[in-house]
Structures are given as structure tokens and as C-alpha cells.
Amino acid sequence: RKVACIGSWHPSRVAFTVARSGQHGFHHRTEMNKKVYKIGKAGEASFSATTGTDPTEKDINPLGGFPQYGMVKNDYIMLKGAIVGPKKRCITLRKTLLAQTSRKALEKIELKFIDTASKYGHGRYQTAEEKKKVLGRA
């Protein structure tokens, strides 16, 4: 099925506004070499944002939640870099097919700090208690 008339004789090209056949649905893309920074399980100590250099007891969620997502309540995986698609799109992870031999892939990951300031506006405070202590009852 296609549009019968795709434009006039001149200009002798097809305008971008003419309906053409093509993919309109969901594309499956393969992302390679995503580094896993942290795996958090709900209800366990790994669900918090506490690290070796930042012993502050705080939740993994930033103040006000993640933009366009909300609060994380279940298990999560923290990955390095960007993941394409909308915030709530499911992604499929699998083991690598090739042996990882590069120095970058083999380095040991040690997180020093996880930012939990608000992602809306200019987030200055890591926890709600810290914000209340500085601003008082506002």
C-alpha cells in the first residue's frame, strides 16, 4: 500500500511531506560493551547509595525522583553511559560473546560517590535531612 501521487512534475523530487512506506514501529538495537557499575536488590544493603568514601545513609533515589520515571522501588542495575529509548523501556542484557581483554574492560570498579541531589532544577542537597537542616522549616 502506498500513496498514488507523490507530487508534481516540477520540482522533480519527492517532498519530505509526502507519505512514504517504511518502518514506523519499534526498532531492536544492540548496544555493546555496557559496563555494569552497581546492582541493587530491593530490601538489601545494596539498594542504598552508600559507597566506601561516602558513608552517608541515603536512598538510591534523588530528591523528587528521577525525571520522567519517578522513584525506584524494585531491583535496579546502574550502567555506565547512555541507554537509548524512553525511560521505562525494558532492555535485555546478556553475557558477552567475546572475551574482554582490554584494560578498560578489566579494570575494577569502585564507586566513590553517587549523586542523589534533585534532578529538577539546581539540586544542592543529597538528602532530605540535609536540606531541612540548612533551610529549616520552609
Image (tube, helix red, strand yellow):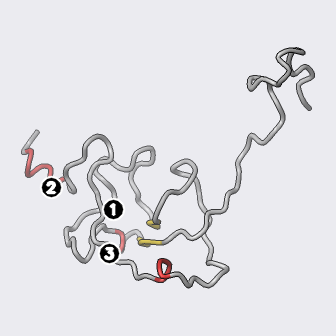
Q: Is residue 125 left or right of residue 27?
A: left
For disc 2, the marked residue is 129
* The label number, if any, that marks residue 60 in the structure image: 1
Foreground disc of the pair 3, 1? 1
* The label number, if any, that marks residue 50 in the structure image: none
The structure residue drawn at horizontal position 86% and vertical position 14%, both measured from the top left corner, is 10
Which comes sooner in the sequence, label 3 or label 1?
A: 3
The structure residue drawn at horizontal position 53% and vertical position 51%, both measured from the top left corner, is 88
Which comes sooner in the sequence, label 2 or label 1?
A: 1
Amino acid of disc 1: Ile
Q: Is residue 91 left or right of residue 103?
A: right
Amino acid of disc 2: Glu
Residue 100 placed where, x, y %? 57, 82
Q: Secondary structure at mark 2?
A: helix
For disc 3, the marked residue is 45
Q: Quadrant of the N terminus?
A: top right
Q: Residues within 10 Å of mark 2 (few under 14, many from 20)?
A: few
